[in-house]
Amino acid sequence: MRLSRPSTLLCAFLTLLNDRLGESIVFPLLPFLLAGFTTDGRTLGLLAGSYAVAQFSFTPLIGALSDRYGRKPVITACVAGSVLGLGLFALTVSLPWSRLWPEAAAGGLPLGLLFAARLIDGVSGGTAATAAAVLADISPPERRARAFGLIGVAFGLGFILGPALGGLLGRISVTLPLLVAVGFAVLNLALVVALLPETHPAEARLPLPGHWELQPFGQLQRVFANPRVRRLCIAFFLFFLGFSGFTALLVLYFKQAFGWGPGLSAGAFLVVGVVATVVQGGLIGPLVQRLGEWRLTQIGLGCVMTGFLLVPLAEPRNAVPVVFTAVAILALGTGLVTPSLRSLVSRRLADSGQGAALGSLQGLQSLASFLGPPLAGLAYETIGRRSPFWLGILLMACVVWLVAGRPRRQEEATP
């Protein structure tokens, strides 16, 4: 099988794009979509984090199922789950519950359905790993780096298109972006069913691993047992704990502090997507060659802390220039820190430990993305609406301490 097979590449790319687009098109609109159900920061944080915990819990199982039964049935089931999750979310926020079923509205049924929809969509988020496996199946080893480049392109494009579409369509109707996301997921499902071939031959199928090996915490325990990467893995977790808490409450803060609508909020996330895509898509390679991962991590953490500091200092009269500058600096820092930290972990491991450790980093990111939003929401409601930003700065300071100290020369090639 060759990398040039257009139908396989198209289906894999659209599946990766759908995974990111379904998330990013909704995220900037959450406080507006939920205005009729809740304005509580803690509830909003839990709802934002529910997607991540479902993805964290089920990604190992979905990957194992694709090794056992093939890529196409697993991708088909996951994309169908994405259609179901997005469709349930769109239907729930569109119905006039207080008029149709006031008892259910008073009892919290709509909010429960929204949590169910996010959990279903999170479980279906395992498509990203399976789509990456498809790219590996059809690519010879010497061309896999090129194939895996599609993952970054799809995720970056999704993070740019999602907020842009959400902001533009949200001006017409706050639920219209959801319907567009559902339509894109349906198109993705139809193309997968019609065009995606099975790329994992029957003779290469593997039996399902044991129960403990399918547990996400089992994977994390194995990587934390290695003292060479333990400190960096803790730093990676704390970084995403602070970052996910910051982003989860950002739109709510924009709405309550500045009176922003969906358009300006989506514009801020669009800036994040563009800057992060430029940094990770084109700049990170030359910068690593010139400065090395350790220096880039330190510079990136400084940028992230600056972004965290600027947002709560903004006032309504200067909010647009200050906030847009802050999120651009934040995106620059994130684009430097995440690949550099992954590379530092990789350099401290033998080749045989790469897959488990780097896979566990993804698990740590998902776990932090679950815990960060509700913790930030709790601080938002109990301490004050600026407190998540100060908490984020404190967490980034801990990350700076964890990665402090010059790396050994063999772990990082610097000029």
Image (cartoon, helix red, strand yellow):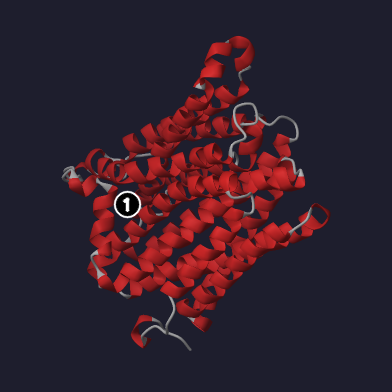
Q: Residue at x 47, y 56 (%)?
A: 241
Say whether residue 11 is visible: no
Q: Residue at x 52, y 45 (%)?
A: 378
Q: Residue at x 34, y 61 (%)?
A: 358
Instruction: Give percent across and percent down for residue 296.
Output: 52, 76
Q: Is residue 97 left or right of residue 369?
A: right
Q: Nearer the viewer, residue 184 or 138?
A: 184
Q: Give residue 342's quadrant in the image.
A: bottom left
Above or below, 294 relative to 87: below
Q: Nearer the viewer, residue 133 or 106?
A: 106
Label 1 neighbour load within 10 Å: few <14, some 14-19, many 20+: some
Instruction: Give percent across and percent down for residue 400.
Output: 48, 73
Extreme residue toward the front, this view: 383
Extreme residue toward the right, this view: 317
Amino acid bearing label 1 = Asp
Instruction: Give percent across and percent down for residue 249.
Output: 59, 47
Instruction: Give percent across and percent down for residue 175.
Output: 65, 29
Tag 1's secondary structure?
Answer: helix
Above or below, 21 relative to 189: below
Q: Is residue 143 left or right of residue 272?
A: left
Q: Nearer the viewer, residue 112 or 170?
A: 112
Say whether residue 85 is visible: yes
Disc 1 designates what residue?
Answer: 137
Q: Is residue 352 left or right of residue 242?
A: left
